[in-house]
Image (tube, rainbow, N blue to C red):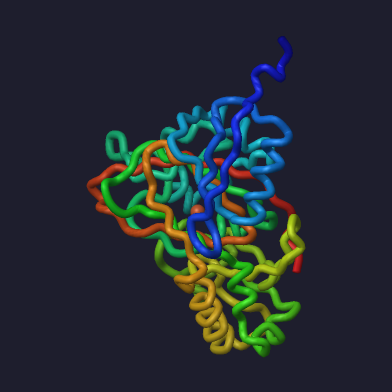
Amino acid sequence: MDDASDIQKLEIRIQPLAPHCGAMISGVDLTRPLSPEQVKIIQQAWDDHLVLVFRGQQVSEDDQLRFASYFGEPGNRKIAPDHLRNRSEGILQNNPKFMLVTNIKVDGRPIGAFGDGDMWFHIDSGYSSRPYKYTFLYGLKLPKTGGNTMFSNTYKAYEALPAELKHKLEGRKALHIHEYKRNERVELAEDISKAPHWYHPVVICHPNTGKKALFVDRLMTRAIAGMEPEESEAVLDQLYEIGERREFIYEHEWQLGDFVMWDNLATIHARTWFPPEEERLLRRCTIEGEEVLG
Ligand SMILES: [Fe+2]
């Protein structure tokens, strides 16, 4: 018997979940190693559908990291500056590769981050010089209602821009700032040097597909460089409206054991509200990205 005996021989099925992103993958057990052929099929499905859902999984931290590693180098959780640390760090976040996305507290102290309520559309670590390429989220504890994750296809958003707006945005960069908030804008009048921030092209070229994607989000993108503030605000509002069009969105209603992975360079994602008295816990890991290019 060689190692190949341990490799799965299941047939992978891909079932689209919405017109423009999201697909359910079945025939894969994430607790076991995958063959290169299986990884290739999943990668292709990922490039095609941007968000993949695996249902009924029992995934340990080791399983999650092993699976993620098929697609790149697992990323470390970003550490916030001291004055924002209490918004991002929890007492049970002991593994630097994981973030616990949760509202659960023990003795009044959060065990993870980004606890309650809704969360605006965003790009994970879009404020950093090298935003994560991919994100993997596993559902461990869920509210009875709400707390859905909405994903929107940003290739589609780019395609939907009026021609003159595409022209206006050519070669432009935008400022992304993170203050570890969930549903309010960063005040530009404040000193942004205290919060993590970076400038990225407004339209990026995806490293896998070569396709153009709109790279802005309501939560963290705060200004378009070189534009007057009023124009920048108006253009960003227009970009958010196009990027969040219902037709581009797949809304994931979580079930226990769901494992969801998304392309963080070709989608934006958001969370719907859920009752604060209900516990929600998801375990996130990521894949490191490169500088994003226009
Ligand atoms: Fe996120």
| Viewer-proximal residue among 125 and 266 | 266
Compared with 80, 265 (above or below) is below
| Viewer-proximal residue among 97 and 59 | 59
Quadrant that contains the N terminus: top right
Q: How many marks?
A: 0
The image shows residue 213 at horizontal and vertical percentages of: 66, 68
Residue drawn at (47%, 53%), measured in percent from left and top?
84
The image shows residue 136 at horizontal and vertical percentages of: 55, 44
The image shows residue 55 at horizontal and vertical percentages of: 45, 39
Residue drawn at (52%, 29%), measured in percent from left and top?
61
Quadrant that contains the C terminus: bottom right
**Residue 196 shows in the view:** yes
Q: Residue furthest top?
A: 1
Q: Is residue 110 left or right of residue 155?
A: left
Compared with 220, 80 (above or below) is above
The image shows residue 68 at horizontal and vertical percentages of: 62, 38
Compared with 34, 224 (above or below) is below
Q: Is residue 36 left or right of residue 270?
A: right
Q: Residue furthest left?
A: 277
| Viewer-proximal residue among 80 and 65 | 65
**Residue 79 shows in the view:** no
Residue drawn at (49%, 60%), measured in percent from left and top?
18
Q: Is residue 55 left or right of residue 145?
A: right
Residue drawn at (63%, 74%), measured in percent from left and top?
158
